[in-house]
Amino acid sequence: MRHALEGRFDTCVQIRPAGVLSTISAAAKGGLIALTLVLGGATQAQTVASLPGNAQAIDNSGNARPVAAWTDFCRRHPTECAVSTAEPAKVAMTPDIWSAIVSVNRRVNARIKPTTDKAHWNVVDRWDFPDDGQGDCEDYQLLKRKMLRERGLPQRAMRMTVVIDELNEGHAVLMIRSDRGDYILDNKTNAVLPWDQTGYVYVKREGQDSMAWTSLGGVTSPTATANR
């Protein structure tokens, strides 16, 4: 994906080595090491029998305009964008559900080859499923959401989210809202992190009560990044 975002452009095909956000600052690394989530065996810490520590829920701050390529994706895949208020707004986290989340994140990250939309589709920005094994950030997250929905997680609790990353560029992640807080699935790391441990600036995400998107106010998570 390479799309205009608050005056920025997104290049979201850079993949960090599994579990390592290589460009975060030394201070940020120290905080993440303490959580055993990012460096030195993060994915091993996220085991089948474990549950994540409690995370905070991020606050909404009004309405936001969706990414144009999202609107086109919804035209082609309307059921992927539908919101059913009969579904739970949050996942009731269990060890089995957490294991599925961690496993799907890791599997999709390993399975998809990072490719820009220009190289893949010859367009600036396109959101789609990486059915041919190639894609960029939003394509990874769309596939993860589909796979988790097939495993019984409510789509309403899994929200596509736009952030500014550690390179000061637009980036798409999947936010899972749960009774233990909000967690982020990301193609840059195999570790599933609480939103406030990613170092990202949170711009907007899908709403949970309609197809409208909601602003996250440009909230910066407490973990600092190298260039912010």
Image (tube, helix red, strand yellow):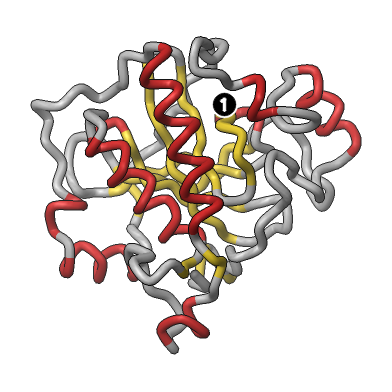
* Residue at screen point 46% across, 25% down: 182
Location of residue 25 in the rendering, given as x and y in whole percent from the top left corner: 86, 41
Q: Where on the picture, by quarter, is residue 88?
A: top left
Q: Position of residue 54 (x, y in %)?
A: 53, 11
Dot 1: what SS? Answer: strand
The front one of 140 and 2 is 140
Residue at left offset 33%, top offset 58%: 66
Q: Is residue 158 left or right of residue 154?
A: right
Left or right of 59 on screen, residue 88: left
Seen in the picture, residue 142 relative to 215 is either above or below; the reply is below
Q: Nearer the viewer, residue 49 or 185?
A: 49
Q: Give amino acid for label 1.
A: Pro
Residue plotted at (60% across, 69% down) = 11
Find residue 145 and report its horizontal and vertical position in percent.
33, 44
Q: Is residue 130 above or below residue 57?
A: below
- Count of numbered marks: 1
Q: Is residue 42 left or right of residue 12?
A: right
Residue lying furthest bottom: 122
In the displayed structure image, the side of residue 128 where residue 172 appears, left or right: right
x and y percentages locating residue 23 in the rendered image: 81, 50
> Residue 157 or 58: which is nearer the viewer?
157
Q: Say if 72 sits above or below 164 in the image.
A: below
Disc 1 crowd, CA 10 A, few/some/many (<14, 14-19, 20+): many
Q: Nearer the viewer, residue 48 or 29?
A: 48
Query: Which residue appears at 40% of the width and 28% of the height?
Result: 100
Q: Quadrant of residue 33?
A: top right
Q: Which residue is mark 1?
A: 194
